[in-house]
Amino acid sequence: MNRPQAGLSRREFLAGSAAFALACSARSASEPEVDLLLQGGHLIDPRNGLSAVRDVAVHDGRVAAVAEAIDPGRALKVVECGGLYVTPGLFDLHVHAFAGTNEPGSLVGDSSLYPDGHTFHSGVTTVLDAGCAGWRDFETFRETVISRARTRVLALLNIVGQGMRGGDIEQNRSDMEAAPTAALARDHADVIVGIKTAHYAAADWFAVDESLRAGEAAGLPLMVDFGDDHPERPLEALLGEKLRRGDIYTHCYAGNRRELLADGTPNPGLFAGRERGVLFDVGHGGRSFRWSVAARCLEAGFPPDAISTDLHIGSMNSGMHDQITTMSKFLALGETLEDVIAQSTWKPALAVGREDIGHLSVGATADIAVLHRETGNFGFVDSFGARQAGSERLVAEMTFKDGRLEWDRNGRTRRDWRELPHDYGEQGDARWDGILYRQRS
């Protein structure tokens, strides 16, 4: 399938680097060359194969330099990150964000969450709304949520024209139409990065087939929440015959659709799907993550391509919590920190064809998470109330979106009040501080 490639070409990268160098040479000796310097953190950047202590400099919302040591005298603001991990801003590949319609019990309404209240505190700078809106109501979603959020909100377009409203609405085959779905996706190609089918209960392939037609017409991948389990449409056929390279199977460790066989071994269809290029998303949610399934799949060599939350009002207040907690669960299952970061940054960005984000290459958008890896005695709960002990967890210390601070758990960017005059005003600077100097577009 043909996807938009939004990453920087070599020519664009060189032009941007040259422009930055020229701008720096034109500054006076007293004027800072960069707005922000994150100093001494352990940088994990999966796209660039980096896992080492590096300084990261930011200017005008983009990564200006990455090096073993950058002169702090060049920076307007220096933030000490020793003992912390610096990563690309996290990308949650599965959320529900179409809030505000006042529709009760609906993911086009009261069950969804405005993103900004649930992203930055978890290190997340980009989310993918997983099909709340269909072609009939997407423009409302874009106007009322996407365009107003500080978080970068991308979207999957539901094959159901009225979107993810539950009940009979999501089972209405006459409202599953490939042509208007694909047309609307093309009209909003800057934010719609895929098609979604979910919760289909019948024992046929209609919803999957119509969604695939929409994906083909729009040149976009399909994410499938496979609905009810039926022997007439088995998981093995979905993964081994229906889905294309780059399509996404979500809730991959739910155990609700025979991801684990009766003998406790992973369904061979999972491996067959991966061999064909199907991608696998966690989509934790309120009833879609089971320790027994995840642990046995990982033991068998079947890790996820993307770690995601399936964020909604039910999941956030149950075992899921947030993106950073979901990532910590995979540390508890034995994954390396580098793998967990890759599954929460570069791999989800690749999955939706957004190579401009999910990394900290020079010239890239400066979406950055600064994480603390805490050790101790912790407990994590799955969607069914089962507990897994863990000896470490991740905490988001700071989050920067477009180079500007959006979250600072322990005030690491701030001065002690005793160092300030008694009548001090707002601290910070609009060039790096997005909290006290929030820009409205």
Image (cartoon, grey):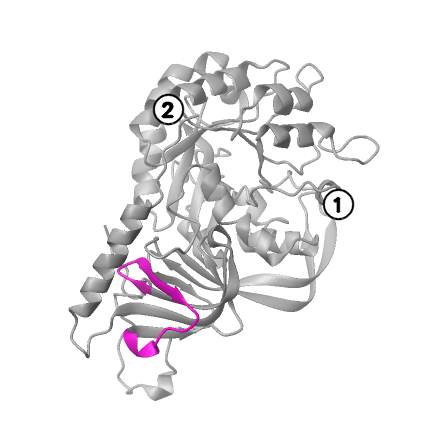
Could you tell me which secondary element the residue under label 1 belongs to?
Answer: helix
Res 427 seen here: no
Does residue 360 appear left or right of residue 203 in this picture?
left
Q: In the image shown, does 136 or 105 lie closer to the viewer?
A: 136
Q: Are marks 2 and 1 in contact (CB under 8 Å)?
A: no
Amino acid at dot 1: Glu
Q: Residue furthest right?
A: 263
Q: Residue at x 40, y 51 (%)?
A: 116
Percent from the top left, x then y, of residue 315?
Answer: 58, 45
Percent from the top left, x then y, of residue 157?
Answer: 42, 28
Q: In the image shown, does 289 or 334 lie closer to the viewer?
A: 334
Please report the bounds of the magenta region as a residue range: 58-74
Does residue 281 appear left or right of residue 429 in this picture?
right
- Numbered label attached to residue 135: 2
Is 264 located above or below residue 330 in the figure?
A: above
Label 2 environment density (alpha carbons within 10 Å; few <14, some 14–19, many ≥20): many
Q: In the image shown, does 231 or 11 lie closer to the viewer?
A: 11
Q: Is residue 225 within the magenta segment?
A: no
In the picture of the structure, the residue carrying the numbered disc 1 is 299
Q: Which one is closest to the eye, mark 2 or mark 1?
A: 1
Label 1 environment density (alpha carbons within 10 Å; few <14, some 14–19, many ≥20): some
Q: Residue at x 30, y 58 (%)?
A: 61
